[in-house]
Image (cartoon, rainbow, N blue to C red):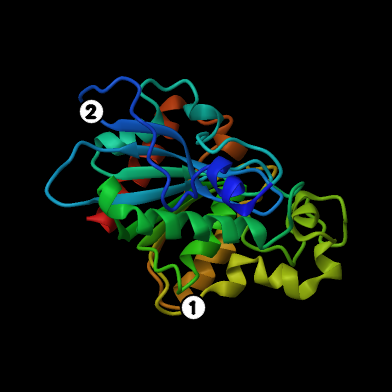
Amino acid sequence: MSDTLRALIAAPHPDVAPLPPVPRPAPGPRHLRGVPYGEVEGGRPLELDLWLPEPADGPAPLVLFVHGGAWRRGRRDDLGPRTRHWDPGPFARIAAAGLAVACADYRLSGEARFPAPLDDLRAALRWLALRAPELGVDTARTVVWGESAGGHLASLLALDPAVGAAGAVVWYAPSDLTLPRGPFDPRSATTPEALLLGAAPAAVPERARAASPVTRVHPGAPPFLLVHGERDTMVPGAHSEALAARLREAGVPVELRVVPGADHGWHGASDVAVDEVFARSLRFARGLGT
């Protein structure tokens, strides 16, 4: 097969591929599903979903959402179990408030080890910046928002000076892969953290430090909103407390909110409490993006 024929039959590169059409154009936010943003040699195509608000005066601020799932599973458009029944859904609500939303795939721990998922999210941001005029978004006003494992990756993105994020919304996320906290044992090779790193964190201490947001804090980092359940049995609240303390020490604006009676994923919290967490997170993101 000639190189010319290979080029002809290959799918267009994500940098130049046309955006998918909106299935049923209607007033309100536009929803584009399965937009390719990156290619990984020998791997699946990387895609993202977009919620684009009604055109306004100038490009819209952007929320990059990062899903959870212990770095091993999960869906890019899932903000957690307590929002799955919402109609309109959480991302449509964010777009209705004037912010664009991109929900990106990233390679899971069964596909590649850290820092692969972080590299993928950086690639998503690069693609969004490249296509920003077409999408009507302003990637200079990007707030990263993640839950659980996605919150961990969102924290690392926000703490990367090269990314230039405007801020971070982080729900019940790990912040330290080096110390035992709650059920986590850094000597175990079977934890989700070990599967992310490719070895027990204690066996690869430099990699574990590089993957720990608490070690990446620096003066000049963007503002953070950290929200954690009071009774989280999977990711103890000490993770958010430690990250908040480190951010304060560096002079970084940070707000830590604890949800009374809530376990991981807001299990055990009232609907009113979950609604308030979402509303506060949206206000925070809007304040940074405008």
Relative to residue 135, is residue 96 depicted above or below? above
Q: Which residue is mark 2?
A: 28
Q: Nearer the viewer, residue 231 or 224?
A: 224
Give the residue displayed 51% in from the left and 58% down from the top: 123
Disc 1 marks a residue whose amino acid type is His
As helix, strand or loop, the secondary structure at mark 1 comes to loop
Q: Give the label, 1 or 2, closer to the camera.
A: 2
Q: Position of residue 97 (x, y in %)?
A: 25, 38
Q: Position of residue 18 (x, y in %)?
A: 38, 41
As helix, strand or loop, the secondary structure at mark 2 comes to loop
Q: Nearer the viewer, residue 233 or 186?
A: 186
> To which quarter of the image does residue 8 belong?
top right
Q: Which residue is mark 1?
A: 218
Give the residue displayed 65% in from the left and 41% down from the top: 69
Q: Residues within 10 Å of mark 2 (few under 14, many from 20)?
A: few
Examine the rendering and report whether any part of residue 223 can be seen: yes
* Left or right relative to 213: residue 97: left
> To which quarter of the image does residue 166 belong?
bottom left
Give the residue displayed 46% in from the left and 78% down from the top: 250
Contact? badges 1 and 2 (CB < 8 Å)? no
User: Which of the two discs, 1 and 2, labels the residue nearer the N terminus?
Assistant: 2
* Left or right relative to 17: residue 138: left
Q: Residues within 10 Å of mark 1 (few under 14, many from 20)?
A: some
Q: Quadrant of the C terminus?
A: bottom left
Rendered image: mark on residue 60: none
